[in-house]
């Protein structure tokens, strides 16, 4: 039996296996490599056999431990990775933590690894990856209903719908999921990236000081992760502080000022701060000052090797120099950078508004106000429950008594949404709705003195970074009011016919409202055609400027047709046709061609030469197109001729207008007839007829007779 055991040991260790042994008297340790017999210098005596017996027992234990270690190595390896990932997560290095949780999940799939990966990606606003890992997490039996709600929120922020995900919510659960409440829309506004200030990094918080100088916050081209080892950023809720989330392998945030077309740091000697952001400008007498958010650096010699410190954002006040830089920086007295955050300043009428997660709030970050006095600051007040809630309220901006802010409350579209409330925060908050807000983060709203709007957002981003956006109005609302004789309002009259068209002839919709006719118009050239019985037809061209969001009013007065008094001369008999000519048009067109202008100019000359003449305008189309279409087209041709002559000084009451669509075909080219374009051209026309009373014929030169002439021949007589 002893020999069999020895042979088994020899076979097991012949390949050079290694194990630490202790002899019976515990006096020496030996690291054994095979072949074993050579190392033991084997001799078959009793003492040697006793040693071998003890050795066999040790080897049995060693081999058992080895097998256990071999098969449990992935478990130990995963736990080590999870421990490291948890450490990175605690240090707010979420991107590093996420990659480690992914690796741990690859070693052995677990609910904890998937959930923590999802949380990590959510905190750096990597929406698609967060959604992917929440989907993994909720597939485990140990997942909770709350995990499913977080999965739903991640899906909303990744652009999914709950219907598409197959998620049904109770009313109570819907109150905890983004995008479940209707918000307003603004179809005339869009926000476009302000490429002048955006970079490959994160850019946000555009501000303009009292002199018109622009500032923004960025992380472009500054220190990298390796230089951040002494700082631990702990804000408890990463979405509440845009300056310092997603910092992995990214630069610190700093304020840039634009001067002479170049962007340079506003805080010189920035080694004092890890981060500087969100400047708020105000006047003190003739000088300009600023309050901005900053995260101070800790002096390295005050920290032990490898130690970190918690450092919270605070507010700092400085003087603004002529070149836009900040000098004489002082901390505000209510900062508590070792306990909680004070950040996101804005100043309006010497009232400082800011956000903080200090004690005594309603939950998360709240908005506060404090008066700026000549000798310091007044008492700090919470803006109250109308503004603040259980979630985070950040990035205040105040204009004309309205407080704008961002919040990640669940009644928004997702992440941070922009809200407004009137009466300096005492009104009911209202979500600004779509266009301003998206399922991603939207924040840093700002409006300059001209009413131009700006915001910051990571909308459409696949990674954790923000861009600056500028509002652009797509059209303005124009209210058109039509007046008649004695300033009578005609736009409410059913007999009034009004058509609004673009310069290209495209009809524009007019909506009748209480105060007139309303149209949505972008920048361009338009014209109105207005007609009503008892008034001369009117065509009013007008230009619209670049939309600015301000409603505009266009007033138009119609000219009544003169009523002939009893003692005035009237046409006592049927007028006589004196001369006739024709203006031709292109297919589907009613603009005056060059050859047509020549005929019309001749008509102007004759009407000016003989003031007792009148002009009849009668327009037609060819047979192609529907009757309704040709009706409009022939009318447009008559109106185009009428307004051309009216603009040349011919009074409207000397012209008569008619149109006949395709009912007066001049040749055989009716419906269904095969005709050339030259044959159809004969029907695309306005017939111009000069009319004269019999009694006025004597006023004409004797060389003229009553034979019908062209305008040119009439001028030659």
Image (cartoon, rainbow, N blue to C red):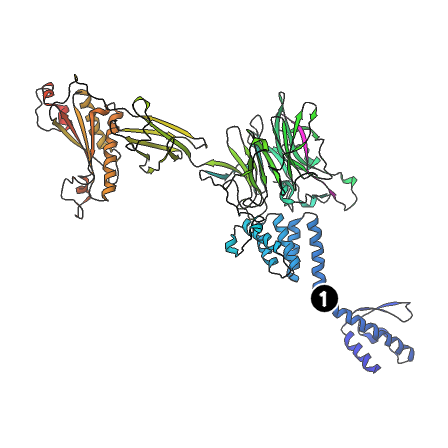
Location of residue 337 by image quarter: top right
Quadrant placement of the N terminus: bottom right
Left or right: 117 in relation to 677? right
Please report the bounds of the magenta region as a residue range: 308-321
Quadrant placement of the C terminus: top left
Left or right: 124 in relation to 614? right
**74 vs 151, nearest the viewer:** 151
Q: Do we see residue 663 in this rendering?
A: yes
Assign the magenta stretch its main secondary structure.
Answer: strand
Question: Residue at the spot x=90%, y=71% of the render?
Answer: 24
Location of residue 566 by image quarter: top left
Left or right: 710 in relation to 189? left
**529 vs 218, nearest the viewer:** 529
Give the residue furthest to the front.
171
Q: Do we see residue 323 in this rendering?
A: no
**Is 222 in the magenta?**
no
The residue tagged with tag 1: helix, strand or loop?
A: helix
**383 vs 70, nearest the viewer:** 383
x and y percentages locating residue 81 in the rendered image: 70, 57
- Residue bearing mark 1: 72
């Amino acid at each position: 039996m002893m020999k069999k055991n020895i042979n088994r040991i020899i076979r097991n260790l012949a390949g050079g296996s290694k194990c630490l042994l202790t002899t019976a008297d515990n006096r020496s340790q030996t690291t054994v490599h095979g072949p074993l017999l050579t190392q033991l210098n084997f001799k078959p005596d009793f003492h040697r056999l006793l040693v071998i017996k003890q050795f066999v027992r040790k080897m049995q234990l060693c081999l058992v431990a080895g097998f256990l270690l071999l098969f449990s190595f992935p478990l130990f390896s995963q736990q080590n990775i999870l421990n490291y990932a948890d450490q990175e997560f605690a240090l707010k290095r979420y991107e590093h933590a996420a990659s480690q949780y992914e690796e741990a999940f690859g070693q052995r799939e677990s609910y904890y690894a998937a959930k923590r990966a999802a949380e990590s990606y959510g905190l750096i606003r990597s929406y698609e990856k967060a959604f992917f890992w929440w989907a993994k997490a909720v597939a485990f039996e140990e997942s909770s209903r709350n995990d499913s709600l977080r999965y739903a929120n991640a899906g909303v922020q990744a652009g999914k719908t709950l219907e598409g995900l197959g998620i049904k919510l109770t009313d109570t659960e819907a109150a905890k999921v983004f995008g479940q409440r209707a918000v307003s829309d603004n179809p005339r506004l869009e926000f476009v990236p302000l490429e002048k200030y955006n970079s490959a990094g994160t850019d946000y918080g555009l501000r303009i000081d009292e002199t018109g100088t622009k500032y923004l916050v960025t992380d472009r081209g500054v220190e990298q992760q390796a230089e951040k080892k002494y700082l631990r950023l702990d804000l408890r809720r990463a979405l509440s502080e845009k300056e310092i989330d997603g910092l992995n392998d990214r630069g610190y945030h700093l304020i840039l000022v634009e001067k002479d077309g170049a962007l340079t740091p506003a805080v010189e000697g920035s080694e004092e701060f890890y981060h500087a952001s969100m400047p708020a400008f105000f006047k003190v007498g003739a000088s300009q000052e600023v309050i901005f958010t900053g995260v101070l650096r800790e002096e390295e010699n005050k920290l032990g090797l490898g130690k970190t410190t918690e450092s919270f954002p605070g507010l700092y006040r400085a003087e603004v120099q002529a070149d836009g830089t900040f000098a004489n920086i002082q901390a505000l007295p209510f900062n508590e950078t070792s306990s909680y955050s004070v950040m996101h300043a804005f100043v309006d009428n010497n009232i400082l508004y800011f956000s903080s997660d200090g004690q005594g709030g309603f939950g998360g970050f709240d908005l506060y106000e404090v008066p700026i006095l000549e000798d310091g600051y007044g008492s700090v007040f919470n803006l109250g429950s109308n503004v603040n809630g259980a979630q985070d309220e950040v990035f205040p901006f105040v204009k004309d008594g309205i407080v704008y802010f961002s919040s990640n409350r669940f009644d928004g579209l997702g992440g941070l949404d922009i809200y407004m409330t009137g009466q300096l925060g005492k009104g009911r908050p209202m979500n600004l709705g779509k266009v301003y807000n998206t399922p991603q983060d939207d924040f840093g709203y700002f409006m300059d003195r001209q009413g131009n709007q700006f915001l910051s957002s990571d909308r459409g981003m696949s990674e954790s970074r923000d861009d600056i956006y500028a509002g652009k109005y797509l059209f303005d609302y124009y209210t058109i009011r039509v007046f008649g004789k004695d300033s009578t309002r005609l736009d409410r009259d059913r007999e009034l016919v009004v058509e609004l068209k673009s310069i290209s002839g495209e009809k524009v919709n007019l909506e009748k409202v209480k105060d007139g006719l309303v149209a949505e118009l972008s920048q361009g050239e338009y014209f109105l055609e207005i007609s009503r019985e008892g008034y001369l037809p009117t065509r009013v061209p007008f230009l619209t400027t670049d939309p600015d969001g301000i409603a505009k009013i266009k007033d138009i007065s119609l000219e009544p047709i003169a009523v002939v008094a009893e003692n005035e001369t009237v046409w006592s008999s049927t007028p006589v046709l004196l001369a006739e000519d024709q203006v031709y048009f292109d297919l589907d067109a009613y603009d005056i061609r060059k050859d047509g202008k020549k005929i019309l100019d001749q008509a102007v000359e004759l009407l000016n030469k003989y003031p007792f003449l009148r002009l009849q305008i009668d327009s037609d189309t060819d047979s192609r197109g529907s009757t309704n279409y040709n009706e409009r087209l022939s009318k447009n041709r008559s109106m185009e001729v009428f307004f051309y002559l009216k603009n040349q000084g011919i009074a409207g009451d000397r012209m008569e207008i008619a149109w006949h669509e395709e009912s007066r075909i001049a040749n055989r080219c009716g419906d269904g007839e095969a005709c050339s374009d030259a044959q159809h051209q004969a029907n695309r026309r306005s017939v111009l007829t000069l009319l004269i009373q019999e009694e006025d014929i004597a006023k004409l030169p004797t060389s003229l007779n009553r034979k019908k002439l062209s305008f040119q021949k009439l001028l030659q007589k």
